[in-house]
Amino acid sequence: MLRNIIRIVSFSAVLLALGCGGPQEYVVTGTERAAGADGTVIVEEIEGNRMVSVTLEHLPPPDRISQGATVYIVWIKPQGAAPTMAGRLEFDGDDRTGRMRATTPHQEFQVIVTAEVDATVASPSEIIVVRQDVTPAD
């Protein structure tokens, strides 16, 4: 009887461990500026930081979103703080896809993708194509 209880408790602990700590996946859709865009934002904890992977599909070229735009930029915006540039979304015009990976020390933040005139901008434009809130896993 005691062995069965130990097995059940051990098995439950394994199931609980498997359910926690894995990557968080958010399904995203484009804003009205890129209504057909969709994709995922995957957040994984690595050594106290968060690895953020953004993958988008059905993304129009930046200049079709906003006149003069040439790139998509990914921003990390922690709660109560200004956004910081995570990097340039690698856009494939033939496939209409974009990919980017970055790290952040923040647990709760927004991922924002904007169309920009160039990759050296200091702050995000108002041309937001994707926005996703990220919250700590339970």
Image (spheres, rainbow, N blue to C red):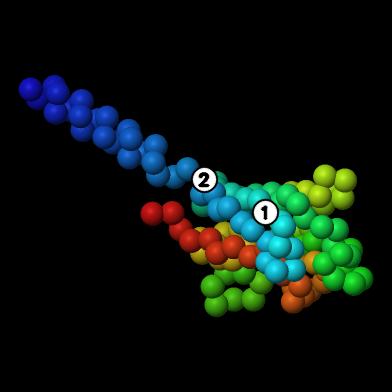
What residue sits right under mark 2 in the picture? 23
Residue 53 vertical placement versus 134 (above, below): above
Q: Residue at x 39, y 37 (%)?
A: 18
Q: Position of residue 80 (x, y in %)?
A: 55, 77
Q: Position of residue 84 (x, y in %)?
A: 69, 68
Q: Residue at x 92, y 71 (%)?
A: 68
Q: Position of residue 52 (x, y in %)?
A: 62, 52
Q: Position of residue 35 (x, y in %)?
A: 71, 62
- How many other residues sit within 10 Å of disc 2, few (<14), some (14-19) or many (≥20)? some
Comparing 10 with 39, the one in front is 39
Answer yes or no: is residue 84 visible: no
CA–CA distance in space, label 2 to label 1: 19 Å
Q: Quadrant of residue 83?
A: bottom right
What kind of residue is marked 2? Pro
What residue sits right under mark 1 in the picture? 38
85 sits left or right of 116 in the view: left
Secondary structure under tag 1 reads strand
